[in-house]
Image (cartoon, grey):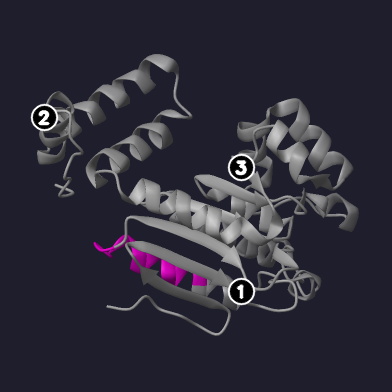
Amino acid sequence: MPLPSGENVKASLEERVALITIDHRPVNALNRQTLEELGKVADALAAEPAAKAVVLTGAGSLAFVAGADIKEVAQLASPEQAKAMAALGQAVFLKLQRLKLPVIAAINGVCLGGGLELAMACHLRVSGDRARFGQPEVNLGIIPGWGGTQRLPRLIGKAKAFEWILTGDVYTAQEALRLGLVNLVVPQDQVLKAAKDLAKKIAGKGAVAVQQALRAIEDGASLPLEQGLAKEAEAFGDVAKSEDSKEGVRAFLEKRQPQFKDR
């Protein structure tokens, strides 16, 4: 079945790689409709056996996602409404993070506020060399509400996260790479290709191993080391009983390329 596409979020599947495009011009701001459409795509991908990797990007060359729709933020009339808005974005981003597929953000422009929070919910990030990053919410008298205060320290460290969030400053792609926030920086016009190439490379691996590796990293990241190691051992055992593990080891010993069947 084709992936669902809405007014602001387009989705397609080609060569086992799903492409999600946030298309809410001019800067792909995240409003309620966009978040809900993105959530529907994530739900569809969770049940799509043909997909082995995901690339998420923004339409146009100006912005990946410039942030939340400030017009909607301005309409929040109570703490309860603000909490509901935070909960919606957090839930959608968690859906992406918890997919059994690697999700790669192709950051083709401005990546600020809610846009950075979305990118951080992805497993890998490919950035254009002219992209700009930041959590500038404090400049509006608010704070990140879609995971910025939680994911940013886990990715760049507590001290730098304090700096980014409390100053609201904007940073270059090169600084994001230095801090480990992004995996790769490429020329601006090559972002989508580089992200797709990375997705296809991962899609060429056995799905069982990729899924179990994602599970071990995600489940163990917030646990004490010994509990994380137990999660890893459990995942290793699950992989070992797969046909793919036997094929991969056999192919290595026979000095040939493995023919994975994703089971």
Dominant secondary structure of the residues highlighted in magenta in the image:
helix
> What type is the residue that disc 2 sits on?
Arg
Query: Mark 3: few, some, or many residues within 10 Å (few <14, many ≥20)?
Result: many
From what the image shows, is residue 143 above or below residue 214?
below
Residue, disc 2: 250
CA–CA distance between discs 2 and 3? 33 Å
Quarter holding the N terminus is: bottom left
> In this picture, which residue range is highlighted in magenta?
38-50
Residue 180 spot, x, y in % from top left:
64, 33
User: Front-most of 69 and 112?
Assistant: 112
Q: Residue at x 10, y 32 (%)?
A: 246
Question: Going from the N terminus, do you reach mark 1 or mark 2 first?
Answer: 1
Q: Which residue is mark 3?
A: 184
Q: Residue at x 74, y 72 (%)?
A: 27
Q: Quadrant of residue 175?
A: top right
Type of amino acid under label 3: Leu
Query: Is 47 contained in the magenta span?
Result: yes
| Whole-percent x, y for residue 97 in the image | 46, 50
The image quarter containing residue 156 is top right
Give the left or right position of residue 179, taking residue 227 as reference: right
Q: Gap between marks 1 and 2, in whole Å?
A: 50 Å
Q: Are marks 1 and 2 in contact (CB under 8 Å)?
A: no
Say if residue 100 shows up in the picture. no
